[in-house]
Image (cartoon, rainbow, N blue to C red):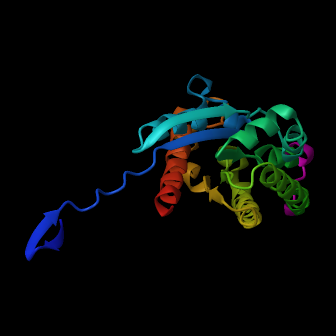
Amino acid sequence: MAAAVIFGYIALRPSAAPKKPKPILYKITALGDSLTEGVGDLENQGYVGAAAEMLKKEKNVKSVSVSDLGHRGDTSADLLKKLKQPKYRKAIKASNTIFLTIGGNDIVHVFRQNFLDLHAGDFNKEQTIFSTKLKQVLKEIRQLNPDASVYYFGLYNPFEDYLGEANEDFVPILAKWNANSKQISENYQPISFIPTSDLFRNKSKQLLSKDHFHPNREGYNKMAKRLIEEIVKKQTKK
């Protein structure tokens, strides 16, 4: 209560009521490959669908709308081409939040091309190409929408059960790939890099679908939970 002196008497008047937080409207565009499409859990739309449902339960969230443009098999080069299409450009311009998964198929390309004779140099060469494409993708997104918050997922290792002893060599390769992608992404703020490799490490049987590559429902839920944690953290800083 605030006090005022009126004719020698102290009169009490109510303090100003605290401002109510503004209701949040999430307009989400989800871009990328099969992870964004939700392959492995199409019924619930993967991490995108799970994250949307989680957001709806958050305080002060008035509405959540989603345009899921993920497409299985897409590489960074494929996504870059699609960003020139009117459907993609319109969705990005209209959004205030963007989800992005890309890079998994770029790595798979290395395995397919060099399966019988894999070397670290093969991944380094592909990473250089991917880095250029990723910069172009993020630059294009920023030109279309300078202000939307972008949440970009890092890659996990779905090959643990297949590589055997060679997995020890692949782990640092993947770590380097993720570190490089994170570093690139930081030049396109506001953006958050969402790591996933630790979520799936040594948990392939529990978190991957029958194809042993894409997450199952539980795997996608773990991705969604980490995503929501980052969204909420960013929202509380505003």
Q: Residue at x 63, y 58 (%)?
A: 192
Q: Is residue 136 magenta?
A: no
Q: Residue at x 69, y 55 (%)?
A: 147
**Frontmost residue, 181 versus 136:** 136
Q: Position of residue 205 (x, y in %)?
A: 55, 39
- Residue 68, by quadrant, is top right
Whether 47 is drawn above or below 163: the answer is above
- Residue 198, by quadrant, is bottom right
Q: Residue at x 68, y 37 (%)?
A: 36
Screen quadrant of the N terminus: bottom left
Q: Residue furthest left?
A: 9
Q: Position of residue 80 (x, y in %)?
A: 87, 45
Q: Is residue 32 visible?
A: no
Horizontal relation, residue 214 to residue 200: left or right: right
Q: Residue at x 64, y 46 (%)?
A: 96
Please report the bounds of the magenta region as a residue range: 111-120
Q: Is residue 166 visible?
A: yes
**Frontmost residue, 146 versus 188:** 146
Q: Position of residue 70 (x, y in %)?
A: 73, 34
Q: Position of residue 233 (x, y in %)?
A: 48, 58
- Residue 177, by quadrant, is bottom right
